[in-house]
Image: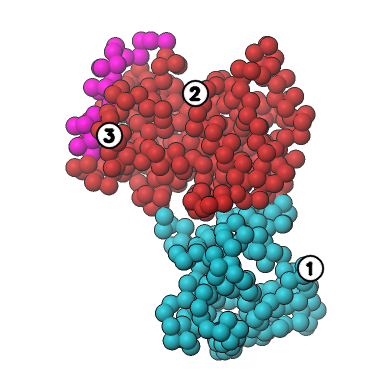
């Protein structure tokens, strides 16, 4: 296993499978009365979040605590960052306290890669700008695998704001590492400019037409809706929210089409949802929806990631 | 989540240089004797729970459970698996591997007589880890240990209550246990390496 987890591409298929298998055991621990393993006793993990987060930060914190590590949360607000300290000085200060892992979320793509060059600790990317969010991809793969079995040959459709989505980038890599086929759907304005290089890969396809993909020959096993990231948009990507919903939202009729073609289809969303924009309440609350499973998988998967990065031979510190 | 359990077993090849110390029939006889010992010691099959330590301990525990209920003529004996990976004291000295599933029977282990089952007892460190793992799962009335092979060289004050065969070994020798269910080859215990030649 690698020392850092910066990109989903750092993980081989064997690595991903080891993490998902471990997560299955960790999921059992989650259901026990005593939710504590001694595995990372004496290790220190800092969650350094330069950007807002509820589920990622809390699940990394709980995961670390359940593995018996000492976890400390820092956010940009309330740390020396707000006094003007640079990212480099901040993380080097933390590194000087002999921590074992730094879990970092930052609004700049590539921030984690840079930090990894400055510190001795293991660096775990908890979302960097519009680049990657590898643990989200792992928990999505885990959720899928626990519902529909091995992902070889399965067809996953990812819909929404691809340009600004780190979840989408990591998901495509991890899903394809596991042998799944991925179709991504977005309006032309939200299709990333460099996607051409991926389109050449076997099992990867792009489309501007959600309905065509839904009714196409290759029926989807799962549909992942992405959040329309209002905070990263400076306008002009689509005329009105209503128009986005009409073209790319998972509306009630689209859900009906999906279920008609595959009654076992799964509806996913990394959260937080904009109900009524990219996903209708019907779809979000449907029996096919595994959105809350994704959250509870997050804990198990993050415990598994911490274990594989920090527990073994040659781990940091 | 059947996927983790339905993986094909990771069978290992047998070292051809070794010699056989227990044949398949002998393994069967050992298990039957251990079963009788457990019943005698426990004065019946009441409150018994067998927990195998992965990988081969689980198969041994399942076989013991079958023999126990045959001998006693009672219903099925609760049997489960106790993974100790996360409790090991040597995690830092090897690459990480995915733990196996811990499966506790529905009756739980509180106030039960838990019999831990493993294939080879060596340093005793695995059993130490298993005892720690048990603490987080409940409070058994008693914990006993049954092993197929005791090869000596204990590093902790731990001993087995029921032993299939005591096998004096040197540190450089390897004891290989192969079981039909897990390894997909006929049952056998072999010893290989060391100074013999």
Of A118 and A67, nearer the camera is A67
In-image side of A68 versus B55 (left or right): right
Task: Give the residue pinned by disc 3.
Answer: A283
Label disc, if present, on residue B155 of the rendered structure: 1
Q: Quadrant of the N terminus of chain B?
A: bottom left
Chain in red, by letter, is A
Tell me which segment is drawn in magenta: A234-258
Instruction: Give the spatial CA distance, label 1 vs label 3.
Output: 58 Å
In-image side of A144 versus B49 (left or right): left
Q: Main secondary structure of the magenta part?
A: helix
Q: Residues within 10 Å of mark 3 (few under 14, many from 20)?
A: many
Q: Which picture quadrant has residue B73?
A: bottom left
Secondary structure at numbered mark 2: loop
User: Residue placed at 49% from the left, 32% from the top?
Assistant: A55
Of A36 and B124, nearer the camera is A36
Instruction: Give the spatial CA distance, label 2 vs label 1.
Output: 52 Å
Secondary structure at numbered mark 3: helix
Chain of the residue under label 1? B
| Residue A72 visible in the current orientation | yes
Of B185 and B139, nearer the camera is B139
User: Residue placed at 51% from the left, 26% from the top?
Assistant: A53
Position of A216 relative to B175 (above/below) = above
């Amino acid at each position: 296993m690698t020392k850092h987890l910066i990109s989903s591409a750092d993980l081989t298929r064997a690595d991903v499978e080891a993490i998902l298998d471990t997560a299955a055991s960790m999921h059992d621990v989650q259901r026990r009365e005593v939710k504590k393993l001694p595995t990372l006793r004496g290790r220190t993990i800092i969650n350094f979040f330069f950007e807002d987060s509820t589920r990622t930060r809390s699940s990394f914190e709980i995961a670390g605590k359940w593995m018996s590590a000492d976890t400390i949360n820092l956010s940009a607000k309330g740390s020396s960052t707000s006094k003007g300290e640079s990212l480099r000085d901040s993380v080097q200060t933390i590194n000087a306290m002999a921590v074992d892992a730094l879990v970092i979320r930052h609004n700049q793509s590539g921030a984690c890669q840079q930090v990894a060059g400055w510190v001795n600790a293991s660096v775990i990317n908890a979302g960097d700008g519009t680049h990657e969010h590898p643990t989200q991809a792992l928990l999505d793969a885990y959720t899928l695998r626990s519902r529909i079995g091995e992902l070889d040959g399965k067809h996953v459709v990812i819909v929404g704001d691809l340009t600004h989505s780190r979840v989408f980038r990591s998901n495509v890599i991890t899903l394809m590492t596991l042998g799944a086929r991925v179709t991504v759907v977005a309006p032309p304005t939200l299709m990333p400019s460099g996607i051409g290089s991926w389109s050449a890969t076997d099992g990867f396809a792009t489309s501007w037409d959600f309905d065509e993909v839904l009714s196409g020959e290759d029926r989807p096993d799962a549909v992942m809706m992405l959040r329309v990231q209002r905070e990263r948009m400076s306008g002009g990507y689509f005329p009105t929210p209503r128009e986005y919903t009409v073209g790319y939202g998972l509306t009630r009729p689209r859900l009906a089409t999906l279920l008609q073609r595959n009654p076992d289809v799964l509806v996913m969303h990394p959260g937080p949802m904009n109900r009524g924009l990219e996903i209708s309440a019907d779809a979000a609350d449907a029996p096919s929806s595994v959105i809350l499973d994704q959250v509870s998988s997050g804990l198990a998967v993050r415990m598994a990631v911490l274990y594989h990065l920090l527990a073994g031979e040659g781990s940091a510190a | 989540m059947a996927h983790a359990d339905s993986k094909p077993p990771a069978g290992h090849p047998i070292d051809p240089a070794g010699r056989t110390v227990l044949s398949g029939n002998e393994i069967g006889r050992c298990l039957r004797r251990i079963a009788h010992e457990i019943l005698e010691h426990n004065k019946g099959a009441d409150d018994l729970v067998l927990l195998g330590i992965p990988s081969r301990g689980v198969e041994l525990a399942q076989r013991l459970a079958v023999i126990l209920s045959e001998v006693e003529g009672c219903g099925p004996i609760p049997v489960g698996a106790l993974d100790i990976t996360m409790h090991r004291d040597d995690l830092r000295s090897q690459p990480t591997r995915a733990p196996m599933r811990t499966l506790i029977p529905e009756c739980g282990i509180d106030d039960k007589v838990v019999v831990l089952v493993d294939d080879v007892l060596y340093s005793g460190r695995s059993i130490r880890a298993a005892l720690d793992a048990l603490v987080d799962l409940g409070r058994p009335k008693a914990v006993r240990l049954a092993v197929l092979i005791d090869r000596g060289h204990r590093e902790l004050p731990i001993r087995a209550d029921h032993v299939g065969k005591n096998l004096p070994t040197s540190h450089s020798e390897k004891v290989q246990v192969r079981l039909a269910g897990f390894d997909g080859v006929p049952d056998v215990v072999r010893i290989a390496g060391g100074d013999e030649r």
